[in-house]
Image: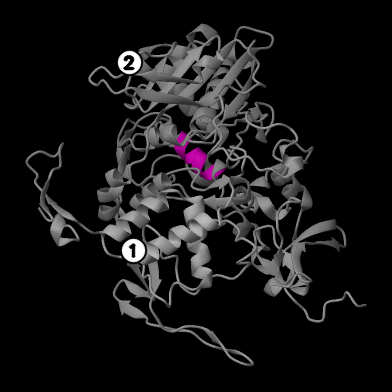
Amino acid sequence: MSDTKPYMIPDVLCPWGCSEYPHKTSVVEPCLILQQLLPRIRLNLPLEYVDRLHIVESICLDYIREDCEDGDYVLLNEKWPVMPTMSMVRGAGAMICCCRHHQNDSVRKRLYAHPPRKMKGIGNLSSVHADQLSLCVLQQRMVHPLRRTKYSVTRATSNLRMSYSGGDTTDFSYGGRFTASTLQYSSMLHIQHSLAGRPNMLKVLDRYEKEGIVSISVKESFLRVHNENSITDDCMSKFTRGALGCPVWNALKLQQAVSIMKFISIDPILSKKQPQFVTCKRTWCAAIYNVNVEDGYGYGCRPKAISPISVRGKQDFTVASTMTWLVLGCVSACKELYQCLSKQSSFDDYCPYLLSYIHHKLMKHCDPISDHRNPIITGTKLREKHLVEAVYKSLKKTDGIAFDNKVESLSMQMNRLFSKCKDVSVSSSIPVSCNDDVVIVVRKTIDDKEVNFVSVPMNSNTPIRYEARVIISLKNENGLSLQNYSGERYARFGGGFINWWKQKRDEKIMVQCCPFQCGDNCHIRGVQPTHQNDVTEDKFPEEIDKSSDMFVIVYVKCLEVNVEEYQMDMHSSLGGQCCLFCLCDNSKKESFLPTNLRQKDRT
């Protein structure tokens, strides 16, 4: 009895990162959690559980800690660890406990952003002030901070400002406040970890010194603490494993979609009426894969698995189902290709059906989007047969060419499906000169040297690098028709996430391929390799069957994201305007009257 807990404490760790009291917990099926935490293994799950795997996509990857990783404790007391817990439920057996706030699937399916875990010196506690050494700071307007007294604590008081836009208690400012009250012990630890984990913060510190935000003595103290308490990459990787965040590009697209309403014109290809364009809103999300995870091995989050798309009926429809699976596998796994199709303003083909299917059937964390003016079938009424029929009619009507189901015409069929998208090109070989955002190559062989290539546009001398993001292999089973082909789908996110995911056509789960840069004993030693610092040879997945009859490879243009290029777009989406533009030449959009923040920059 000496080891019993003297109080009822929240020591149950929820898979979504919360802590809960034992008597207030809910339960979730352990097979779903195990399948998410074991991405290289395909468990033999019943179909009803496979269809519910999307509800655990945002759980913490560090729910089960490694031997080298520190645990979490209640009030930093090592006798009170917060650990995963299971309970025996009558009629269901052993179940994993979760908190009361994640007891419904409608809440579990949402995307959650998990910050990196804090180091042992900080524990679960944070500073009352925001991180001052940052590109932008959310300063809380504190009148009276939270303070501890002898038997309790005094509540914090903040200044609340109200307007027609709402109320808030924080200010969005450029540059922090480096005073004695903000530079406390916990704040200094945050700054130390920021300098160790983000090298660009050193440039921010230099700029703050030049602008007079940070004094020379404070800067030297930061650098001295940084040099004396260096943090290794392996140590940093232990705490960033499982961190989820939204990429900058996705955040910008989502903000623009909310603030700027753009209408489109749709001529439903499945309608039996006369062709007529209808103006309506989009019934699909602005961007996909809005949250990605730092897993330490360069995989990222699990891509969405697709169904086999096998529609039975007459031969043309059966052949079109393979083409539909091929196009759906490419677009749903590549957010750049999805964006190229989505940004069109007029549709008279299969694209609105495809984009709506991806939103409502694959991106299950999103809410349904509907518009009573939209003439196409959307939401729960949209079926695979509607998508196959739309692809079939698009192939039939393009240039008046009859549908051909021979495998030699696959390149021509893909070209017809993407002919109306200006930023996508389809070819049968690696292009020497191109400037498209996405290049789709259809060929019969594959070589590791072609996992990426460099192309020089005709009107520019600057080379552009393209990287393979999606590979789909088709293999003839027992005939010459596309309806008898089996397929394998490989996908990755690129931009540092170099390892691949795999899915067979007759399966509904994406699993990880063998990694490139680490041996099998890395995980056993407790060493977490980081894809950010390791320089490895990029290549196609080793599991790919190179004896397949046909390969479809999706290449994406690799460009460094320049925040300044998106600055005006972000200001416009927020309703602001930093410059007065001259409308004489809309293509250049030169600033006519710059209004910079500092007086010395107003030239």
Q: Is residue 166 visible?
A: yes
Residue 32, horizontal then vertical, whole percent: 73, 48
Residue 543, numbered label: none
Q: Quarter of the image for the N terminus: give it.
A: bottom right
Give whichever of discs 1 and 2 has the lower sequence position.
Answer: 1
Q: Residue furthest left?
A: 584
Task: Identify whether 426 is placed above or below 511.
Answer: above
Seen at 65% across and 29% down, the residue is 503
Q: Which residues are magenta?
A: 354-361
Label 2 neighbourhood size at 10 Å, few (<14), some (14-19), many (20+)? some
Left-right relation of 575 to 46: left
Of residues 457 and 517, the one drawn nearer to the viewer in this rendering: 517
Residue 301 is covered by the magenta coloring: no
Identify the residue at the far right of this view: 1
Seen in the picture, residue 104 relative to 486 is either above or below; the reply is below
Rendered location of residue 35, percent (x, y): 73, 43
The spot of residue 291 in percent (x, y) is 52, 48
Quadrant of the rendered image containing residue 93 = bottom right
Residue drawn at (70%, 58%) of the image: 70
Residue for badge 2: 433
